[in-house]
Amino acid sequence: MDLTLLKQHSPCAWEIPAQGKMRVPAMIYASKELVRAMDHKVYEQAVNVAMLPGIVGASYVMPDAHWGYGFPIGGVAAFDADAGGVVSAGGVGFDVSCGVRCLHTGLRREHIMTVQRALADTLFERIPAGLGSTGGIRLNSAQMDAMLSGGAKWAVERGWGSSADLERVEEQGQMLHAKPKYVSEQAKKRQREEMGTLGSGNHYLEVQEVTAVFDDAIASAYGLHIGDVVLMIHCGSRGLGHQIGTEFLRKMVEAAPGYGLILPDRELACAPIRSDLGQEYLGAMRAAINCALANRQILTHLVRDVFAKLLPSAQLPVLYDVSHNTCKLETHRVDGRLRELYVHRKGATRAWGPGHPGLPQALRASGQPVLIGGSMGTGSYVLAGTTASESLAFSSACHGAGRAMSRHQALKTWNGRTVVDELAQRGILIRSPSMRGVAEEAPDAYKDVNSVVDAADAAGLARKVARLEPLVCIKG
Amino acid sequence: MYNHWEHFEHGADIGVRGIGVTKAGAFEQAALALTAVITDPQQVAAVEAVHITCEAPDDELLLADWLNTLVYEMAVRRMLFGRFHVDLNGTHLDAQAMGEPTSVQRHQPAVEVKGATYTALRVAPIDGGWLAQTVVDV
């Protein structure tokens, strides 16, 4: 991106001033190096989002942003329904409620290393991963609707977890106002065999060691200490969410002219929040959020089963569960006034600051855990939401490292088996059904996650708490 | 001009491009490019045919619908497709997709496609033929 197009506010805050048809400015939170490395398409997409009706504040861009579909991935935009605001299927993405769940294990690195290989093999055997994999749970029509309304709460009620898990999940594990009746039969069919599956691409399950702590007080409140072992699950709403995204994107493209929406890019397809289509999408999208929450809950149950066999002393309580492809109705203070806004986060994590009433009591003084997944050979991070993030970007932060290289290029550059062997020499055991998939997800195909979280910290979006490094990775 | 497919770069995802002597040929090639995101199309045996129809207001949405229908059929049938025959009549598509059940061992599927987007979506005549392309989310 051309820096001369931007007005710099601070080392990690850059403005694209409102111009032309932009209703608000765009704000990019990233270091000079990260902004310079961003594709110019990110600039164009941030500007396009700023043109949408009812947008409030600014069109926000996170440090890990890259070229997406209409909205940049790593984009945040809030809309006021009373001001003609819109909801956009592209602003949420195909993998609705894709997110990260982090579990404590109560174990230390030395405990894991005694069974590392058996743990990797057993997790790989028990966690359905990769294209075409199926879960062991089949839902009939009534059960599917109950899952789509109940989310992780539904899964816990079925015996896959405990009620204590739910207070550490956004929305307490159940997205309210989901409307399964707006989820098509095709979407439900696509999900029928996919409950409790990891998926493929950049989705993974990792056993990780805490290797650095940057904020002792918050890390301690989160229960993280150097040498502790945690487990991180990255996946989303599987085929159901993909189908909902596909279908509503299509419907919104066709309906937009009828709503008088003149879109600079067809991919920005949206509908007024106060329209039938807008409400149908919100109902279906919330059902997909519940699907993702239930899926991560079921995977948690499978993981606990594996640990119970291999490391019976382990307890695996949830540290936190965050989604990074969502649109949620939230209350935010804008120019001194509280407003109800529909906040789209596409490849961005909600990051509530200390004292937020939505946080469980044990985390309230520290702020919300913000879970940042890296690539399989590098680190992941736990950050904490800040008070400042509310005014910077409606309490939002980055979500991952972001790719630095296309899959095509990665496949030409690396061999999957070699990547697995090299990581094994560094003590990281990779298990995957596809060596081609491993090559495409090679660690160096990703941006440096350290620079992304440093920028989020420097911008004030979230505070660095701890760094995690993988010991075992199950790659979808 | 000859029928062929290629991928083009898009940050985190992949662009699929079909080039054909005819528009229908370009749609067939775009479908092969879609399969190639997942596995080598030449490794997919044509043992079972699935009939697909789509109708859309314009060529570009028709291409997106065609690819999205293939994504759906691959997901629910747990199949991969390696050969395609497309007939176009205006903006009505009638096609056969031929393939086989997915074998993780043999096909080594790299990634599942979530859906075809409208990013870089284009169906247009080019020098002596047709181009059909879009970006798919993986």
Image: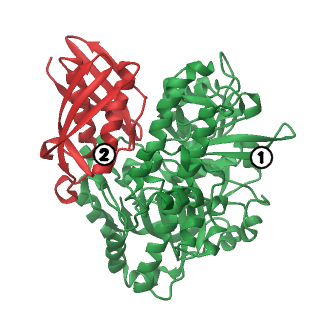
* Residue tagged 2: A410
Q: Nearer the viewer, mark 2 or mark 1?
A: 1
Whole-percent x and y of residue A324?
Answer: 56, 50
Q: Is residue B111 left or right of residue B106?
A: right
- Near mark 2 (Cα within 10 A), the count class, few <14, some 14-19 or many ≥20, is many
Whole-percent x and y of residue B116?
Answer: 38, 35
Q: Please report the residue visible at 62 percent of the width from the left and 62 percent of the height from the top.
A: A173
Front position in the image: B79 or A168: B79
Is A67 drawn above or below residue B45 in the view shown? above
- Marking on residue A331: 1
Whole-percent x and y of residue A165?
Answer: 61, 71
Question: At numbered mark 1, what does the secondary structure look like: helix, strand or loop?
Answer: strand
Is A321 drawn above or below residue A180 in the view shown? below
Is tag 2's residue or tag 1's residue first in the polypeptide sequence?
Answer: 1
Letter of the chain that mark 1 sits on in the rendering: A
Three-letter amino acid code at disc 2? Ala
Three-letter amino acid code at disc 1? Thr
| Residue that sits furthest to the bottom in the current view | A313
Quadrant position of residue A311? bottom left
Query: What tint does the image give chain A?
Result: green
Q: Are marks 2 and 1 on the same chain?
A: yes
Q: Quadrant of the N terminus of chain B?
A: top left
